[in-house]
Image: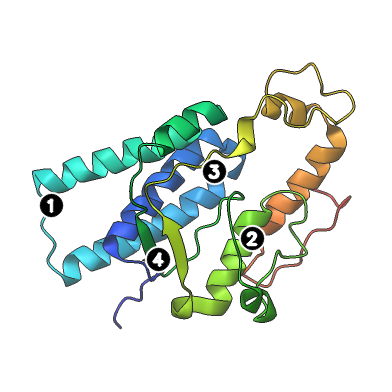
C-alpha cells in the first residue's frame, strides 16, 4: 500500500511550518506534545516529497532554510510599535501570496463569513486557550485541499503575546513581570487552560475520546 501524506502543503510550505513549530515547541513547552506530533507528520511528508521528486539538497537550499528559520525566530522578539512601523516603512511593494492550508496565530486574521457558514469555528472544547489552533485544525479538517488563505509575506505584524501591559486588568497580576508568571499564579485560569489544552491535544479531530469538562479530573 502506498504511503499517504499527512498534510497537503508544498515542500517549501512544509519546511516553513516545521520551522515555526520547532520554535513553538521551545517557547511554549506546555504544548510540546502536540507540536512534536505535528512535526513528526510534517517530517513524514517532507520525506515523501523528496523521494517522489528525487529532491537534491544543495548548499543554497540549506542556506535558504537557515534564513527562513532566522526570520521565523524574530517572531519571538519583543518589539514595540515604533520598531515595527520603521521596518514596514521600508516595504515599497506588498508581497501577497496564497497558501492552501490554514495558518492562524491569533493575530491579524480576517475571516470570510462563508468559512463560518461552512462550519468552521472555534471548537466548544477549547474556549479559553488554544482557540486559534483549534479553529485552524477544524478548518483544515472541513476544507481540506479546497482551503485558500492569503498572506502578506513582507509586512511585519506584532503579536501581543508578551505585551508588558497584557492582563493588567486581572486582579492580583498587575505587578508580575511576564505573562507566563501571571497566568501560572491564577489557579482559575490554569484550570481552564489545562482542560482546553487536554481537549486540543488529545481529542480534537484525532480520535473519539470524551471531551474533558471544566472541573473534571486532569490526572
Q: Point out the frontmost of discs 2 and 3.
A: 2
Q: Is residue 78 visible?
A: no
Q: Secondary structure at mark 2?
A: helix
Q: Which residue is mark 3?
A: 32
* Quarter containing the N terminus: bottom left
Picture layout, residue 169 above or below residue 110:
above
| Disc nearer the start of the sequence (3/4) | 3
Residue 172 in the image: state x and y as whole percent.
88, 23
Q: Nearer the viewer, mark 3 or mark 1?
A: 1
**Marks 3 and 4, how far apart at CA:** 25 Å
Residue, x 75% and y 18% (percent of image)?
176
Dot 2, how many residues are within 10 Å of its Cα: few (below 14), some (14-19), or many (20+)?
many
Q: Earlier in the sequence, mark 2 or mark 1?
A: 1
| CA distance separating discs 1 and 4 | 23 Å
Q: Earlier in the sequence, mark 4 or mark 2?
A: 4
Q: CA distance from mark 3 to mark 1?
A: 28 Å
Task: Locate residue 125, reporting x and y percent.
Answer: 76, 61
Disc with the residue nearer the chain's start (3 vs 1): 3
Q: Quadrant of residue 45?
A: bottom left
| Residue 41 position by quadrant | bottom left
Answer yes or no: do the residues labelled 2 and 1 have beta carbons within 8 Å?
no
Residue appearing at x 38%, y 71% in the figure: 8
Compare marks 1 and 4 and give the one earlier in the sequence: 1
Q: Residue 148 at x, y = what percent?
A: 46, 72
Residue bearing mark 1:
57
Which comes before the other along the chain, label 2 or label 3? 3
Judging by the rendered image, the residue that carries numbered circle 4 is 99
For the residues labelled 4 and 2, say whether their Cβ atoms are less than 8 Å apart. Answer: no
Q: Which mark is residue 88?
A: none
Q: Secondary structure at mark 1?
A: loop
* CA neighbours of label 1 inside 10 A, class few (<14), some (14 to 19), many (20+): few
Q: Are marks 2 and 3 in contact (CB under 8 Å)?
A: no
Amino acid at each position: 500500500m502506498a504511503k499517504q501524506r499527512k498534510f497537503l502543503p508544498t515542500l517549501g510550505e512544509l519546511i516553513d511550518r516545521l520551522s515555526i513549530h520547532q520554535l513553538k515547541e521551545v517557547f511554549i513547552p506546555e504544548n510540546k506534545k502536540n507540536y512534536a506530533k505535528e512535526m513528526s507528520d510534517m517530517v513524514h511528508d517532507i520525506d515523501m516529497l523528496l523521494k517522489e521528486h528525487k529532491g537534491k539538497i544543495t548548499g543554497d537550499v540549506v542556506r535558504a532554510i537557515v534564513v527562513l528559520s532566522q526570520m521565523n525566530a524574530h517572531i519571538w522578539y519583543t518589539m514595540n510599535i515604533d520598531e515595527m512601523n520603521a521596518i514596514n516603512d521600508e516595504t515599497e511593494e506588498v508581497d501577497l501570496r496564497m497558501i492552501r492550508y490554514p495558518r492562524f496565530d491569533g493575530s491579524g486574521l480576517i475571516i470570510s463569513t462563508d468559512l463560518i457558514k461552512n462550519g468552521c469555528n472555534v471548537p466548544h472544547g477549547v474556549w479559553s486557550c488554544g482557540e486559534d489552533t483549534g479553529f485552524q485544525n477544524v478548518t483544515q479538517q472541513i476544507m481540506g485541499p479546497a482551503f485558500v488563505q492569503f498572506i502578506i509575506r513582507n509586512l511585519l505584524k506584532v503579536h501581543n503575546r508578551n505585551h508588558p501591559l497584557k492582563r493588567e486588568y486581572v486582579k492580583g497580576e498587575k505587578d508580575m513581570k511576564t505573562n507566563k508568571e501571571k497566568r501560572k499564579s491564577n489557579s482559575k485560569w490554569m484550570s481552564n487552560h489545562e482542560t482546553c489544552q487536554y481537549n486540543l491535544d488529545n481529542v480534537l479531530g484525532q480520535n473519539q475520546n470524551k471531551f474533558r469538562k471544566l472541573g473534571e479530573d486532569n490526572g
